[in-house]
Image (spheres, rainbow, N blue to C red):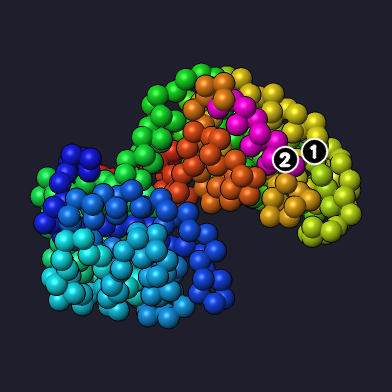
Amino acid sequence: MNIDNYNFAGKKAIVRVDFNVPLDENGNITDDTRIRGALPTLKKILADGGSLIIMSHMGKPKGKVNPKMSLGHIKDAVAKALGTDVQFAPDCAAAADMAAALKPGQALLLENLRFHPEEEGKPVGIDKEDPAYDAAKKEMKERQKDFAKTLASYADVYVNDAFGTAHRRHASTAVIADYFPADSKMLGYLMEKEVKAVDNILNNIKRPFTAIMGGSKVSTKIGIIENLMDKVDNLILCGGMTYTFAKAMGGNIGTSLCELDKLDLALDIMKKAKEKGVNLVLGTDCVAADAFSNDANTQVVSVMDIPEGWEGMDAGPETRKLFAETIKPSKTILWNGPAGVFEFDNFTAGSRAIADAIVEATKDGAFSLVGGGDSVACINKFGLADEVSYVSTGGGALLEAIEGKVLPGVAAIEGK
């Protein structure tokens, strides 16, 4: 079922959103991107004359009530964004009466789903090595079904608009879909856009295709790198993982980030790229600092010859130029992970060079997808989010989709 073609008039719709927004110490939202992202779906339901039940997780309370992670903190912000009053159910598993009393055009926000261990479906308080673990896991899966059934009982229709959690088979993201017929469950607008953007990257490639993978560790990106190796023309590897490659090639990297147990993996990636005809682009110089601080002393050095006591913090000028020259002619671009410690203003130049080159390529007709928490924070920090084709809200979900994995939250709706 397609949300655009569905009339919610007189229906109660339960919508899984990703309102796991960052809060400051006073419980105020510091970035409302995820709330704004869900508005088209939520407003469509209310405009049609439907009743709206909103559910989400926040943080990692590990199956226990934690007032700091209560969705009560964001109720007023959600109401303001929706332009209507929002009621609040203090226990998502005991909201049947409040849901039943909802009238068309009214909205209800359920308390944090993860206050109940059944949401994630993992046994609590028992080690995986314990002989009783398998039995506890089986029992929890049954409890998860019951929890999902309870949530489903509040509504006539289920909408999943939480791409950020689509890679998890949780009660509210996948199991709940089993309790709705095919014509009463659907993806929300945000999910549809995310799925289409990933499809563009994986199955609708216009060449040259350039993927930029940054971040600190090669190990966390290996699945994506291997899946992309058969698809991309250019693969730029940057950020902290640069120094693992430099070390693998015999370089001196000072105190830079390095996964010493992944040196063989780095060499293997280089070998595979060569075999597959992929242009693997690695940094040649870097901005090194004598401390992990914005105010540290800096010098530009070769990534193969970083002095003792110094660490690579950002891509150097030659590397920035190399990255930009690779990105600008591209017609499909994926960016996941910064080129340096962009949180420090003095080490943003590498990531900024990537962002500027992507913007230029996009203006020339490229499809550009930026995803993963740090890359999104980067593009927002530079004020360029509106100048790329798509900014993904899903971190882990995006990465797993690009790895070629089936996302349970999507499969539960599409019946795959």
Indicate left or right for 131 with 377 as reference.
Answer: left
Indicate left or right for 414 with 355 as reference.
Answer: left
Q: Residue furthest front?
A: 83
Q: Is residue 244 visible?
A: no
Q: Residue 128 location, x and y as percent?
A: 38, 69
Q: Residue 302 location, x and y as percent?
A: 84, 37
Mark 2 and mark 1 in contact? Answer it, CB < 8 Å.
yes
Q: Which residue occupies 34% across, 75% down?
A: 115
Residue under label 2:
350
Q: Residues within 10 Å of mark 1 (few under 14, many from 20)?
A: many
Residues under labels 2 and 1: Cα distance? 7 Å
Q: Which residue occupies 10% across, 50% down?
A: 181
Residue under label 1:
316
Q: What's under tag 2, amino acid-wise?
A: Gly
Q: Which residue occupies 85% across, 45% down?
A: 306
The kind of secondary structure the magenta stretch mainly shows is helix
Disc 2 on helix, strand or loop?
Answer: helix
Q: Is residue 26 above or below residue 154?
A: below
Q: Residue 122 location, x and y as percent?
A: 32, 68
Q: Quadrant of the C terminus?
A: top left
Q: Is residue 220 above or below residue 35?
A: above
Lower sequence index among marks 2 and 1: 1
